[in-house]
Image: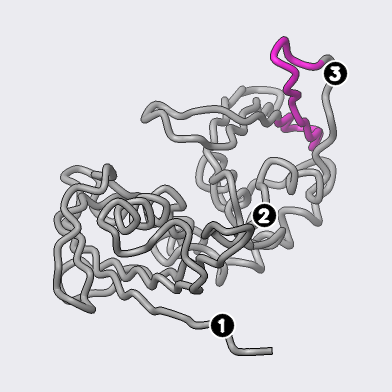
Amino acid sequence: MPTQASVEIPIRIECNPTRGHEGERWDVVDVIDTSNERYLGCIGVYEIDLRYRFPDSLSRAVVNSLIDAGRIPENDSVRYAITIQVYDGCEKLAEHTQIMIPRMGKLVRVDSQQLNSFFMLSELGFEHEDPFLPNGDFLLALDLGNLYLQAGSGLNARFVPVVNVWGTHHTGRTLTEIKIELPTEIASREHLLALLTFFLLHQLGQDFEPNFHTELIQEGKTLTHLLPRQFRAGMKG
């Protein structure tokens, strides 16, 4: 069987920190195909969040711009590897390679290896909560005794898809409302638990202990190495 031809396209994205959100979000300044030093111009993505994972919306926008520019024919029989590197000045913030393969006469993106965060919550003990919502969706819930959590898919204030987790923590004297945003996709169960634990301890304090499922939080505390680097300091006592 002949080896399939492959083309590599290196893309460099220059960014500046978003004012007021330094270390969390970056403004897209330039998008450059470094194989020929051509600028792709406006790709339709103006701000990116790199805290959790490489934004799928960014890789889609780059691929669509390359197709519109004629750099990638939609009906090609060649495999493409688009390596996207994001820089803030001289510092590389992130890198992602998007694979495009020929299938049924067209180029298609290879499916993401990320896992659906909402459904992965069931791996942490969350269970379906009745009834189903009017649109057919459903909520998940986790009862930790002194903390009752619910989760559902939705949009945040910036209209970005997220998994919302909310609930109320009670001590007998106080009630504390919990609100957490998780990414819609995650690398593993352990990454998800690390994030959830970080946000819970950030809002409830490092000494928080649930009445039920105490092993869940204890495990989450051992997974700090999986957190985005800017979060790790927040797990220290």
Q: Which residue is mark 3?
A: 130
Q: Residue at x 28, y 74 (%)?
A: 92
Label 1 sits on a secondary structure element that is loop
Q: Residue at x 48, y 59 (%)?
A: 75
* Front position in the image: 168 or 185: 185
Q: Amino acid at mark 2?
A: Leu
Q: Considering only vertical position in the picture, is 144 above or below 54?
A: above
Q: Considering only vertical position in the picture, is 137 above or below 81?
A: above
How far apart in space, not on screen, are marks 1 and 3 (Cα)? 50 Å
Q: Which residue is mark 2?
A: 115
How far apart in space, not on screen, are marks 2 and 1 (Cα)? 29 Å
Quadrant position of residue 125: top right
Q: Residue at x 84, y 35 (%)?
A: 127
Q: Which residue is mark 1?
A: 4
Of the 4 image quadrants, the one containing the N terminus is bottom right
Quadrant position of residue 226: bottom right
Q: Which residues are magenta?
A: 132-149
**Magenta region includes residue 52:** no
Q: Amino acid at mark 3?
A: Asp
Q: Are marks 2 and 3 in contact (CB under 8 Å)?
A: no
